[in-house]
Image (cartoon, rainbow, N blue to C red):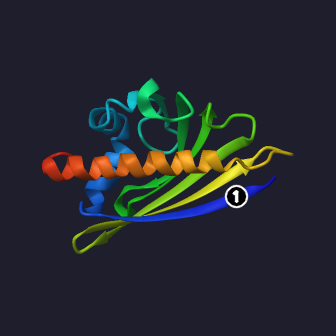
Amino acid sequence: MVVIKTVEEATYRVPAHRMFKALVTERQIMAPKVMPSFFSNMEIVHGDGGVGTVKKATFTQGSGLPFKTMSLRIDAIDIEKYYVRSTLFEGEMIGDTLEKIVHETKMEPLETGCKSTVRSEYHLKPGAVFNEAIAEATKMHSQILNKAMEEYLLSHPDVCA
């Protein structure tokens, strides 16, 4: 099996505990609230938010994404260390070329906000050729959501406090 790896880093003007809460533990609440034109729905379909929890996102037609749904499973989480590993395992994004996408996210507190490091692994199906457009769509989706979340949290200091 071929695995393509990427690393993305970004800094935010919001403390790590708030960004982590908004993007991980309360993502199913915050994402549709912050970006209703992007997310039709996001829900926990299995679990309590810990390891094994499955979340499903449904995107609007106007989201600009080449897929309508995706499901991810939380494989590991450490709230105190702002760490989560999740597997995207279902949805049109997976398609005919991918078995899964594993994302490992770590947020580090900074004096004026936080730094996020996301390591992604694209696990290709046997004989499949990696589609760079999938990686770009994932990156775009993540950047748009994270920046929108940052702006929302800055303008609503009591949310995810």
Q: In the figure, 130 relative to 41: above or below?
A: below
Q: Where is residue 15, by image quadrant? A: bottom left
- Residue pictured at 60% horizontal, 50% vertical: 135
User: For the residue labelled by badge 1, is the local secondary structure a helix, a strand or a loop?
Assistant: strand
Q: Where is residue 90, by image quadrant? A: top right
How far from the left and from the top, in percent, is residue 53? 49, 38
- Residue pictured at 41% horizontal, 52% vertical: 143
Q: In the figure, 64 relative to 41: above or below?
A: below
Q: Is residue 41 visible?
A: no
How far from the left and from the top, in percent, is residue 74? 51, 45
Identify the residue at the far bottom of this view.
Answer: 111
Q: Is residue 33 visible?
A: yes
Mark 1: give few (<14), some (14-19) or many (20+) Cα within 10 Å: few
Q: In the figure, 127 relative to 35: above or below?
A: below
113 and 134: which one is in front? 134
Q: Is residue 90 left or right of residue 138?
A: right
How far from the left and from the top, in percent, is residue 25? 36, 45
- Residue pictured at 65% horizontal, 61% vertical: 5
Q: In the figure, 44 relative to 80: above or below?
A: above
123 and 148: which one is in front? 148
- Residue pictured at 55% horizontal, 53% vertical: 103
Q: Amino acid at mark 1?
A: Ile
Q: Is residue 93 left or right of residue 113?
A: right
How far from the left and from the top, in percent, is residue 92? 62, 31
Residue under label 1, please give it. Answer: 4
